[in-house]
Amino acid sequence: MSKHLVGALELCDLPDLSIEGLNIRVDTGAATSSLHVDNIDEIERDGQMWVSFDIHPNIHNVDEIVRREAKVSDIRKIKSSTATRERRYVIETPIVLAGMTWEIQLTLTDRSEMTYLMLLGREAMAGRLIVDPEHEFLLTR
């Protein structure tokens, strides 16, 4: 499989979460991808753990909030960029980047102090993407 060149920032869609045109920070320093969410509630559905959470689908309108639900695939202890360990829910969801679609794992966390609502980590890029950090939006503009 040939790998696609991406910049430090790209745009993606998360169709299962009804998010389009999300600005993402491509981060080779992060193993797992993460998404900013608020108000996470654990719910049970058919004997399985799900989470319900608020997301801001439009980076240009932070007042817009939508409630989404996803099945939990794992719970992990993640070391954040500030070196604190945090228990995070992990969901699996398709990502669409420049017409390509594949499943990724996303940890759900409070990224309100961060500039970008989503980080795309190494695991999601493996075998598919090569990063040129000098540029932005190489694949999606």
Image: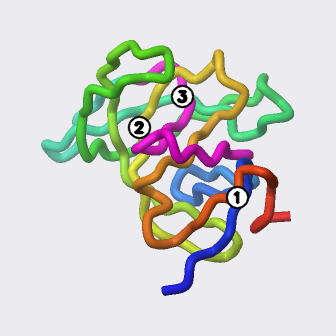
Viewer-side residue, 30 vs 60: 30
Q: Which residue type does callout 2 highlight? A: Thr
Residue 26 in the magenta stretch? The answer is yes
- Drawn side of residue 59 relative to residue 107, left or right: right
- Drawn side of residue 118 relative to residue 11, left or right: left
Element at label 3: loop
* Cα–Cα span, label 3 and label 2: 10 Å
Label number found at residue 37: 3
Q: Which of label 3 and label 1 is nearer to you? A: 1
Categorize mark 3 by other alpha carbons within 10 Å: few (<14), some (14-19), many (20+). many
Vertical order, 114 against 35 (above or below): above
x, y percentage for residue 31?
Answer: 40, 44
Q: Which residue type does callout 3 highlight? A: Val
Q: Which of label 2 and label 1 is nearer to you? A: 1
Q: Are marks 3 and 2 in contact (CB under 8 Å)?
A: no
Element at label 2: strand
The C terminus is located in which quarter? bottom right
Residue at image coords 49%, 15%:
82
Range of magenta residues: 23-40
Categorize mark 1 by other alpha carbons within 10 Å: few (<14), some (14-19), many (20+). some
Identify the residue position indicated by label 1 in the image.
132
> In the figure, residue 131 lies in which quadrant?
bottom right
Residue 50 in the magenta stretch? The answer is no
Residue at image coords 65%, 16%:
113
Categorize mark 2 by other alpha carbons within 10 Å: few (<14), some (14-19), many (20+). many
x, y percentage for residue 125?
Answer: 50, 61
